[in-house]
Image (cartoon, grey):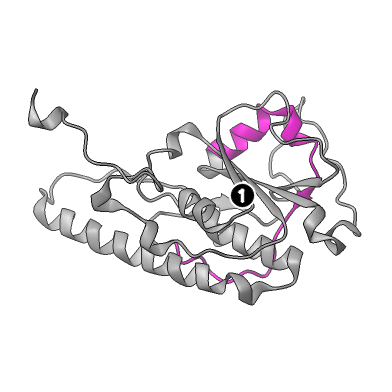
Amino acid sequence: MSAALVPRPQCTACLRPRSGCICRWVVPTAHAVEVLVLQHPLEVHQAKGSARLLHLSLQHSRLVVGEAFAVPVWPVDGKHTLLLYPDSLQDTAPDLRVPTPLQPEWPQAPSRLRLVVLDGTWRKSRKMLYQSPALQQLPRLALRNLPPSHYRIRKAHGPDQLSTLEATCYALGQLEGGAARFQPLLNAFDGFVEYLEQAGGQRNAQSDKSCPRPRVTEFIQVTG
């Protein structure tokens, strides 16, 4: 068998090659709101993605891979499920269902909340929403007055787009009223980003600089 075809040893926790294991940045973080991350299939093996790090750091979280969800993938257990997504769309589709209004009393009981987060590029996450009637009907949580994203390794189309990890941490801080509790995880994410920057710089130094690099975007928009 060719050496190029031999699979690299993989970390059983983060599912990445051991040489690129991200477990050093995992920060166990206490939280009351359950988190369900719906990850686009193209993000599963994306080295720059933040969803796996988020999932490993949040005990009450689940990560499901898929592009279209015809039926809910969350249980009917008495919890209130809401979607982290702008409360108004810039474009509309004739068959797009109107979301249920977010009830103002829901955030008063964080342990009874479930937050659904779409992990993918802005275009991919929007397509996931359009293909998933169950998601369209969920009440939406939009975030405002946020600091600039630290996700500088991937290109954003606007200042209101954040990485999946950042957006989820800010949403949990807003819902639970304890933003400081999620700062250690955000600090660890900064270290993860710095590592990827350094690794990318080393690869660029070894590659032909005349070869154009593909542009990659994987921010999610969270403001209306």
Assign a secondary structure to mark 1.
strand
Identify the residue position indicated by label 1 in the image.
61
* Badge count: 1
Q: Quick one: quadrant of the C terminus?
A: bottom right
Q: Is residue 152 above or below residue 126?
A: below
Quick check: 64 left or right of 192?
A: right
Q: Nearer the viewer, residue 82 or 54?
A: 54
Q: Would residue 107 be counted in the magenta stretch?
A: no
Q: Residues within 10 Å of mark 1 (few under 14, many from 20)?
A: some
In the rendered view, tell whether residue 179 sits above or below residue 211. Answer: below
As drawn, 67 above or below 148: above
**Residue at the location (78% across, 57% down)?**
111
Nearer to me, 71 or 152? 71
Q: Which residues are magenta?
A: 124-151
In this orientation, which residue lies closer to the viewer: 90 or 54? 54
**Residue found farthest to the front:** 12
The residue that appears at 86% across and 43% down in the rendered structure is 78
Image position, residue 60 (x, y; %): 64, 52
Residue 37 point in image, percent of width and height: 59, 44
- Image quarter where the N terminus lies is top left
From the viewer's perspective, is residue 161 above or below residue 186? above
Q: Quadrant of residue 199?
A: bottom left
Q: Is residue 128 left or right of residue 214?
A: right
State the image quarter where residue 93 is shown: top right
Q: Position of residue 212 (x, y in %)?
A: 21, 45
x and y percent of residue 213 in the render? 25, 46
**What's the residue type where badge 1 is placed?**
Ser
Residue at horizontal 45%, vertical 61%?
Answer: 26
Residue 129 within the magenta-colored segment of the rendering: yes
Q: Residue at x 44, y 39 (%)?
A: 43
